[in-house]
Image (cartoon, rainbow, N blue to C red):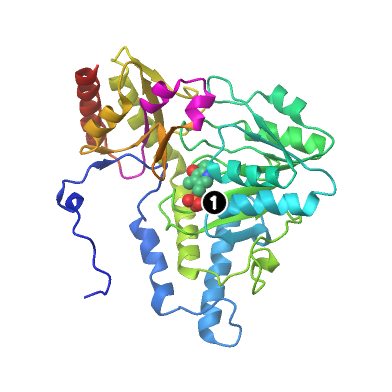
Amino acid sequence: MGIVALPRHRYFSMQRPIYLDCHATTPVDERVLQAMLPYFRESFGNPASVGHLYGWEAEAAVKLAREAIATSINATPEEIIFTSGATEANNLAIKGVAESYHSKGRHIVTVQTEHRAVLDPCAYLQSLGFEITYLPVKSDGLIDLQELESAIRPDTILVSVMAANNEIGVLQPIADIGQICRDRQVLFHSDAAQAIAKIPLDVNAMQIDLMSLTAHKIYGAKGIGALYVRRRNPRINIAPQLHGGGQERGMRSGTLYTPQIVGFAKAVEIAIASQSEEQQQALKLRQHLWNRLSELDNIRLNGHPTQRLAGNLNVSFTNINGAALMLALQPIVAISSGSACTSAKTTPSHVLISLGHSKELAYASIRFGIGRFNTLDQIATVADHVLASVRSLN
Ligand SMILES: *Cc1c(COP(=O)(O)O)cnc(C)c1O
C-alpha cells in the first residue's frame, strides 16, 4: 500500500454529482492517458539528454508534440514554449514583455473581465511603476473596440485580451483586436486557455503575437501548457521569468515534462479533429438546459447570447439566496457559483460585477460548463433539480 493514505472523507461515500464544471478543469481523456503512459516508465528519459536512447526517445516525442500544437494554431514549432499551464504562460507573456520593452513604454491595456492570472501580473507590474488601463465591458461582456483604440497610447507596449472568458464564455473579437494592435504597432497577447481547440485559432490570420494555452481544460493533464511567442513579423523578445538549464531556448528553464507534453498534443489533436461535432453537441445540450431554465421568470442570462463558448451557460437568479441555492444543488451537480473563495473570504465574481451586477445578484449566479462527456439525460436531471430548487427558495 502507498505511504500516503487518502483521508476517509465523508464525501467519498456520496453518490457522485453530475460534473458540469468544465471551465474549471476536465478529466483526462482515456486516449490522452494511453498516449502519456509510455513516457512515465519506459521512455522516461530527459529530452535534453543527447547521449543516449532514453533522451532521444523523449526528445523525439516532445518534438512531435510541439509540431502538433504549433500546427493547430498555425504557428511554427520554434514559437511554442512549454510552461506549467496558462497561469505561467500569462505571467511569462506579460512580465516578459514588460521587462523586454520597458524602454519603449510602460503602459499596458487589458480588460476588467480577464482571468486573475492576467490581472494579477498586471497589478504586480503596476507596483513596479507600469501603468495599466483596464477596459470595461458592455453589459454583454464584449469590449468596445473604439474604447480599445482610444486607450492605446504612444507608450503602450502590450494589449492583453482573452479569447474566451472562463466565467461567462464570451468570445472577444480577437481578429479585430489583432488588426488594431498591428496598425498601432503594439504587441497583442491573448489568454486562450478556454478557447484552444474549441474555436478556430490562427495566430497569423488573427495577428496574435503571444498566446497562452493549457491542456487541462481540453481533457489533457493539469500542470502543462504553453506560450506561443511570435518569431517573425515582428520577432518578439521576452525576458525569461525562470532561469536555469536554458531549456526552451532560454525562455523557460526546467526539465521538460514529457508525459504531460505528449498528452497535451494528443488532447489538442482529438479536440481539433472533433471540433465541429463536439461543439455542436455542447451547444445542443446548452440550448436544452437554457430552454428548460428560462421557464423561470427570475432568471437572466449572463454574457452575449451567441458570441460565447458552446458549452458555457451562466445565469443569475433575482430574489434568491445564492449560498442556499448552491447548497441545495451540491449533491446533484458540480458547478461553480458567482463567488470566489479566497482563503476564508468570499468575494463576488469580478466578471459579473463588471457586467453591472450587484453583489447579491453575482452571488446568486451559476456557471454551467458542459463538456465532452455530458449527456442529454444528465442535462435533463440537472434542469429538473435547478427548477425545483429555485422554486422552493423563491
Ligand atoms: C484555467 C484558466 C487559466 C489558468 O490556467 P492553468 O493552466 O490552470 O494555470 C488562465 N486563464 C483562463 C482564461 C483560464 O480559464
Q: Residue at position x 39%, y 29% from top?
A: 313
Q: Residue at position x 64%, y 50% from top?
A: 74
Secondary element type, mark 1: helix
Q: Position of residue 223 (x, y in %)?
A: 47, 59
Query: From this viewpoint, is residue 178 visible?
Result: yes
Label 1 CB-ligand 1 distance < 8 A: yes
The stretch drawn in magenta includes residue 359: yes
Q: Mark 1, residues whose alpha carbon is within 10 Å: few (<14), some, or many (≥20)? A: many
Foreground residue among 255 and 173: 255
Q: Position of residue 136 (x, y in %)?
A: 62, 26
Q: Position of residue 220 (x, y in %)?
A: 43, 56
Q: Quick one: which residue is furthest to the top in this view?
A: 297
Image quarter of residue 259: bottom left
Image quarter of residue 316: top left
The stretch drawn in magenta includes residue 155: no
Q: Position of residue 342 (x, y in %)?
A: 43, 43
Position of the N terminus, as image quadrant, is: bottom left
Say which residue label 1 marks.
86
Q: Quick one: which residue is furthest to the front in this view?
A: 344
Compared to residue 138, the image places residue 162 above or below, namely below
Q: Amino acid at mark 1?
A: Ala
- Residue 345 appears left or right of 382: right
Compared to residue 162, the image places residue 243 above or below, namely below
Foreground residue among 152 and 369: 152
The magenta segment is 350-373
